Each structure stands twice: as structure tokens, then as C-alpha cells.
Image: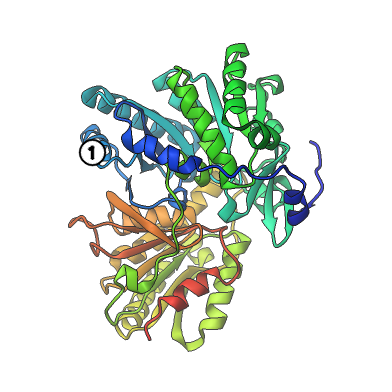
Amino acid sequence: MAVYPELQLSSALAGLPPVATQKLREEIRDEVKISADGPLLVILDDDPTGTQTCHDINILTIWDTERLVAEFNETRAQRRGGFFILTNSRALHPDQAKALIIEICTNLQAASRLTGQMFEVVLRGDSILRGHFPLEPEAVEQVLGPADAWILCPFFMQGGRYTIEDVHYVQENDKLIPAAETPFARDATFGYTSSNLRDYVVEKSKGAIPGDQVTSVSIDMIRTGGVQRVLEFLLAEVENATSRLVIVINAVADEDIDVVVAALLQATKKGRRFLYRTGAAFVSARLGIFSIQPLSAASLGLSGTAGGLIIAGSYVPKTTAQLQALTSKSGDQLTTVVLDVKTMLSAPGEAERKLQEAIKIASAAILQGQDVLVMTSRDLVIGQDEKESLDIGSIIASGLVTFLQRLEQRPRYVIAKGGITSSDMATKGLRMKCAKILGQASPGVPIWRCDEPGSKWSGVTYVVFPGNVGSSDALYDVVSRWRQA
């Protein structure tokens, strides 16, 4: 595979054509709200972090037809433009993930027929390219029929994910690192070797999607040609495609995505059908959602004397650095409980005893107003192959879920660190079926609230803290800002 050099962020951005100063996001928002016959956007999120650029929109964790009919009707009545479904498919084996996507799309299709409401699907995936691709879009098409093209757009500025000349980069300070050169690309389950997204598609499809069926929208096209030029390109590429077509979107600013979304909406009106595999930035652009300032403890109504609860299971290096900063800077204002992973895997009896002890310690500390961190030990344990690594992850996640299920003392808030961890804490630990996305605790860090009486601690503020977002101090900053005076 081709090797690409690191770039300086400032100089790379300075060398691009200037951003067009258009108010496209406002136009998209108005169209989404006013259009009564346009398709709703259904975002199938393979972990909860895809909500990180949105607010005032629902996320479902169940997807029976009755629930989907109700959500279609509510979303249209409230003119929200769409809603999320949390699949957590990144925690599943490929055959399980495929079956799940087929089940959800079958139910969506049934709900669409019952309500007369059209919809489009976005498969929101990790902005560093980890996940079931191309398996998930193939599963969608198995139910809903083939799209005219797949749109691949992992850009996510808040997380420092940029695509320039088809190469996807991860920002580290003022450097842009080609994605395949980062630790994320060595993921035990979803690793890859291609930083160039055209090559990535060929690699992940094992050649089933050939390189000549992968094309791209360049930043130059977006910024010098605008909506009309991108629209003409999309229509021409669809017209000339001889087999499955994948279109890579280059972007380094939210305004770039707005141009592409505006063109895609026009192409949809002309009868073209697209299936999207994207990062979070595309979702908020397609829904016409503007960013808002991080929410404060006061605006969230975080009153009371109980301590907060932070649960961490992610193993990416950024999470470990954030946990180190949290524990070192909090000092005696934080009680830390470590669940040993090797004990979980090899000595269930001892693990159970340690879990009971952890619950006792955490309960007492929260009651006394002390913030509590419950984290897995930081020694990464992986299996001999992808399947065994996923199974190990499931055992670890189960231990954290059991902790939350058994904890009776209600905290002021709950922060879950890591995508799969936060999914399990929401669905299994807190029993959420439908939650509202309130906004962000810090850039790229979404806040949910579930008010359903059947959930655990109904109305509790719940923070989905992605494993790979923010500076080393980002987690500490949220906890310290929300700490009791």
C-alpha cells in the first residue's frame, strides 16, 4: 500500500482554496423542517458516539415496528428531520452484525409502509474507519434494494479527522497523521493498512469493489465549483457507473460538508438514491443542526449532593492518557476503583468478590458527595484472532454492566468512556429504550437523558464520552467543571 507523509495542519489548510461563505446550513435546516414529503434520515449508529454533533433529537435502542412507527410520526410532527438507532454493531461478530442490520431495515421498511413516510439510511461509523464495512451497507441493500451510490465521508473536525486528496488523516497537535499510521489502524478486530480511502474501499471489500468504481469529490470541486458543480458530478458518476459505485468525500471544514449535502439533497429530488457511511459531521449537516456551546452543570440541572460516576472500558491510548490526567489532577476529590481484566477472564469467583467490593466502595463514596471512577485495568488483553478479541471485549463489558446494574446509590450524573462501553451502560446498565440528545459536555462528547419510568435512574444526565476524542485533559475538564463546590 502507498505510504503518505505527515502534514502540518496549518500549512495543509492554508494551501487549499478558501472556504465559501455561504449560509447553506440554514437552507438545509429550513428544507428539512419545511419539507413534508422529503425522506426522514435514520442513522444506524454502530456505537453511541455518532450523536456527538447533534442536539434535540432522539436515539432509540430498540427497533420493533411499533416503536419505529411512533418515532416516524413524532419526528415528522416535531420537524426534526430524523432520528438515531443505536445498533452497537461494532461489538458484534460479522454474521451477527449482518443479521441485526437486516432486522432493523426490515422493520424500518414495514414502519415506512404503515406511515407512508420515506426514509434514507446513514450508517454512522467510527471516524477512524473501524467497523463492519462493506458488510453493513451490503446488508442494508439486501433489504432496501441497491442504492445508486455509496457515500463514504469519515470527516469529523471536532475529533481532528480530515480527508485531503482522498487520504484520511488524524490530527495530533499541529500534525496530520495518515490514518493507517495511527494505533487505531492496528485495531485487533477492524485493522487496515490503507490511508487513501479509495484503496481502503478496495482493501476492506477484498477487491469485490474494484478501484475503478471508487471516485471522489475533491475539496477544490467543493470550494470552487460549489453545489452546482458537485451535483453535476454526482449525477454524471451515477449515470456512468457500471457496477456498485463508491464516492469518497474530501473535507476539512463543516462548510465543505454543507456543500456536499446540499448537492445530495438536490440529487435525491431528482430520483437518485444514496446510502451513506459517514462520521458524525455528515449527520448534523444533513439534518441542518448547528453546533451549540457545551452544556454547563447549571443548565443541566445537576443539583444534589451525590458524587458523579465515571465508568471507563476503552483501551485506545487517548483514553488511557485521559484517565491518567483525571486521576492525577483530581487527587483526593476522586475515588478510583480498578477492575482487573485478567481476573475477569481467568478467575470468575475472585472477579465476583472484587465486583461486590467495588460496588460497596463506590456506593459509600457517591453518597458522601465524592466522584467515583470505575475503570478496567489498563493492560490490553487481545485474542489470537478477531473473533477471540471481540469475545474478550464482551466479557470485560459484561463486568462493567453488572457493576452498574447492581449499584443502587444514584449518582449526580454518569459518564461512560468508550463507544462500546457507553452503549452497554445505556442499554443494559441504565435500561434506556429512547433517549433525547441534549447537546455536548465538550466538543464531540454527547449528553443524553432518558425520562422513561422503566429506565434506571430516570432523568439522570448521561455522558457518552468517545474513547478517542479530546485532549488529555478533556475528561478531567468535564468532571472538574461539574464537581460539587
- Tell me: 307 left or right of 178: left
Query: Residue 216: x, y in percent?
Result: 66, 29
Which residue: 57% across, 69% down? 322
Q: Point out the residue furthest to the left here.
A: 453
Mark 1, residue position: 77
- Tell me: 93 left or right of 322: left
Which residue: 37% across, 60% down? 401
**Residue type for callout 1:** Ala
The one of 219 and 406 positioned closer to us in this rendering: 219
- Tell me: 484 left or right of 153: left
Above/below status of 468 relative to 139? below
Which residue: 70% across, 52% down? 182
Query: Residue 227: x, y in percent?
Result: 57, 30
Query: Residue 35: x, y in percent?
Result: 33, 31
Above/below status of 288 relative to 359? above
The one of 230 and 309 positioned closer to us in this rendering: 230
